[in-house]
Image (cartoon, rainbow, N blue to C red):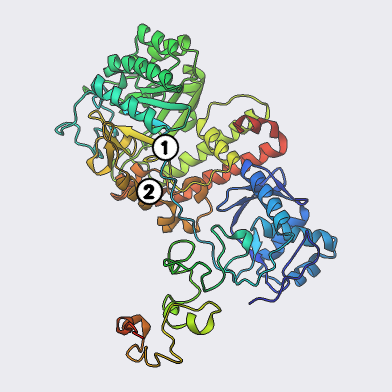
Amino acid sequence: MSPPVAALSPTRTVRNDRTLALREFHPFEAFGARFLYMVPSAGIFRLDSTGAAILDALAAGPCEPDALVESLSGEYEIDRILETIHELTEIRAIGDPSAPKEQVPNDLPPADFPLNTMVLNVTNKCNLACTYCYEYGEDKIVDTRYGKQPKFMSEETAEESVDFLLAESKGQQVARLTFFGGETLLNFPVLQKTVAYARRRAQEQGKRVEFSFTTNATLLRPDIIQWLADNQIGVTISIDGPKAVQDGLRVFSNGRGSYDVVLPKIKELLQVHRSRPIGARVTLTQKHLNVLEIFRHLTQEVGFWEVGLAPVTTQDHRDYAITPEGKDEMLRQFEQLAWEWLECALRDEHHGFSNARDTIEEIHKGVSKAYGCGAGLGLMGVATDGNVSLCHRFAGSPEHTLGHVSSGVDRVKQQSFLVDHHIAAKTDCHTCWARPICSGGCYHEAHVRYGDSSHANLHYCTWVRSWTHTCLEIYGALAEKNPKFLERFDA
Amino acid sequence: MKHLKPINQKAVRIEAYVAREAASTSAPERDVVGLRRPPHEQTGPHFPLGCSLVFSPGWEVDSDGGTAGLCQPVERDIFDCHLSCFWPAHVPDQLNHALDWTGKCASAQKDWRNLDLIFP
């Protein structure tokens, strides 16, 4: 049994029998101010000069509280030092070095966790033949050509899916339905009917459904655009950048580039559809890594409200796979865009770099994830035959099927997925400070890369840490100079 | 907090939690308890070290559902509780009536099957 606690006063109690040492956090600075990103809670605290001095002193090694106070007492009042030690202990920035290391908690989500978003693959057919496609390219995991998957989702299956979503969204007032493909617009009639059906069913149950869809824009027509605008459907366009970039890998099956086909259609869409912001989703490859050029083209010349970029998911030996040097270059440009995003945010202006916006929002909320994403839990994908899978990228993969929209989710399978993919099982991640925000990353990326969706995406570790650190600095800068801007993430 | 400023939403919640815990522990429990962690850091219900106040099977697991966090090996409920605990365990009285109850059980982990029933 330890000796009793040395009570200095009820509000500041420091155990004198314990040595103090640094615990787990990630420090960062902005405009000269020093911050702590706490791991794994993801809380962010700003240090005053006393706190900074205490952490600097402990950075040299563990220290007795008395010795620590003595070493700093020339500079700061003793009461102030004791109070700060107490506060740093309370937030677990410092503590007893011999205390057992905190285990990564392994509590699973509650069994009645609602389904928030359902991604409906209304077709797995596509009129483009993009070289890097995960559905048809060399890394495909679903046999879309010779398998038993129907090419198009039937109206009945789509309606069953809507009922499934509304039932599985449980007590939630709003459910989100995303249409995906293949090329989604190849099955536009079912899309239209499903939206009408979902609206009616949701209304009967006192709920609301929000719709969005992703398209390559080749099949947009004035009547479709008008329908999208009238129905307030969120639209994401898959596009890779200027003509040279887009025509490199986003091609028709005869090899012809798609830029000239999609550009006028996208411009019309942006002009007519004003009820929801329209975003571009870019796949980056080793062939075209000029992130800045792509971003400027899509925002300034084409007119997208926001642009999100993601490196291609593929194996290392493909010629479009991004090399380690390519990743460094991509990161450098991401960070440059992120600093531009900050410049705009400091002036309360919009900047369309959604990668920065998304990460800053997660930092602001202090998310600490048990899973890389909501797949298989709050988000599920539905294949054309109605099979429910982890997400749209796994739709149709028997190995990753969790059930069927008619019979519901196989809870035993889902439970085993949740156990295998929990951060507690990803021991590689347990010493990483960026785990609250990364949590091992995308399951599909891991599956393609390691043949195992529960594997941590170790090939992105350095990248994720550097990117997260930059976003923390940007967040700190906003907290110092324009904290009001952050209120827009409060919802 | 006077010297640390919570910046994001999670930090605000941590600060509120710390303040709440400080208020609730300002009148600490006056009980002799052995703890793996201080009370304010414990997640589940609090059990005293090594024994059970709840007379039911199943207490041989720790608050996380495993055995790693138990203060004593699970065999303790066979060999130790009836000697050292204030709560008499449900094992034969080896002082008066069943002196050689454990005679064939040199090691509880291996030989516990040799422990037999006692008929008065």
Q: Establish if A125 lies above or below A320.
A: above
Density class for disc 1 (Cα within 10 Å; few <14, some 14-19, many ≥20) is some
- Can you name the residue that lies furthest to the top here? A223
* Residue at the image position 30 percent from the left and 84 percent from the top: B114
Judging by the rendered image, the residue that carries numbered circle 1 is: A378
| Residue A435, x across and y down, in percent | 50, 50
* Residue at the image position 55 percent from the left and 68 percent from the top: A100
Residue A285: quarter of image: top left
Residue A183 in view in this figure: no
Assign a secondary structure to mark 1: loop
Which mark, by number, is residue A321?
A: none
The front one of B68 and A243 is B68
Q: Establish if A210 lies above or below A7.
A: above
Residue A363: quarter of image: top right
Which mark, by number, is residue A418?
A: 2
Residue A432 in view in this figure: yes
* Residue at the image position 69 percent from the left and 76 percent from the top: A3
- Can you name the residue that lies furthest to the front here? B120
* Residue at the image position 32 percent from the left and 38 percent from the top: A320
- Same subunit, labels 1 and 2: the answer reads yes
Assign a secondary structure to mark 2: helix
Residue A82: quarter of image: bottom right
Density class for disc 2 (Cα within 10 Å; few <14, some 14-19, many ≥20) is many
